[in-house]
Image: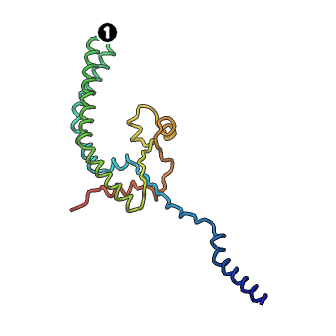
Amino acid sequence: MKHALAASSVLALLAIGALVGPLLLAQAQQPAAPAATKVALINVRAVLKQNARAKAFQAQLEETIKPFKAKAKQLADEIDTLAAAKNPNQQLIAFQKREWEKVNADILRLIEDTHKAHMPAVWNDINRAIDMASKHYGFQVVLGYGNADDPDVAAFQTIKSSKTRTMEEMGCTSALYVHASVDLTPVVIEMLKPRAK
């Protein structure tokens, strides 16, 4: 009888162990790792340079300010000629400089007014294309960048720029390397091309 009781006690303990053991020995469930965030880059300058609407309004702007540029150049040449004279007329030089400054102020005003009138529509198109491309390729973050070493960008700057200066001194993002798989620039440029109707 003792053997039967001992055997049944052992079986009962094994059954309890089989039920409770895994719970006691199991490690706490680790939460599933979050899906990796996918980040894409877009060269904003390249997109703007290829955008048909931006190119059209830039051409229109250039045509509008052409006479102002010609007048500014004429005044600058006159100022240089007056200054190079044996006895330069300082009052006339000062007057010509004020006229030159007025013409340049007109040019800047025209540029600003044109940008205010046309750029919102351009940015709406670009933002729509970026949104569609990022959703299609599954990117959650899209960063815009410009290449500080691009000669077109350098032409607008008065001091030498570089990627290092852009990051260190100006606190801006500069892409040191962009793998083609995360660069949405060509996709966005293609999406913004006018389609034949």
Where is 56 relative to 78, above or below?
A: below
User: Which residue is at a point 48% across and 47% down the rendered structure image?
Assistant: 175
Residue 108, image quadrant = top left
User: Which residue is at a point 27% across and 51% down the rendered structure image?
Assistant: 52
112 vs 2, nearest the viewer? 2
197 vs 80, nearest the viewer? 197
Residue 54, position as x, y percentages in the image: 28, 46
Residue 139, position as x, y percentages in the image: 42, 58
Q: What residue sits right under mark 1 in the picture?
A: 87
Where is 71 relative to 49, above or below?
A: above
Placement of the C terminus among the 4 image quadrants: bottom left
Q: What residue type is labelled 1?
A: Asn
175 vs 29, nearest the viewer? 29
Where is 100 relative to 141, above or below?
A: above
Q: Could you tell me which secondary element the residue under label 1 belongs to? A: loop
Q: Is residue 3 left or right of residue 124?
A: right
Residue lying at the far front of the rendered structure: 1
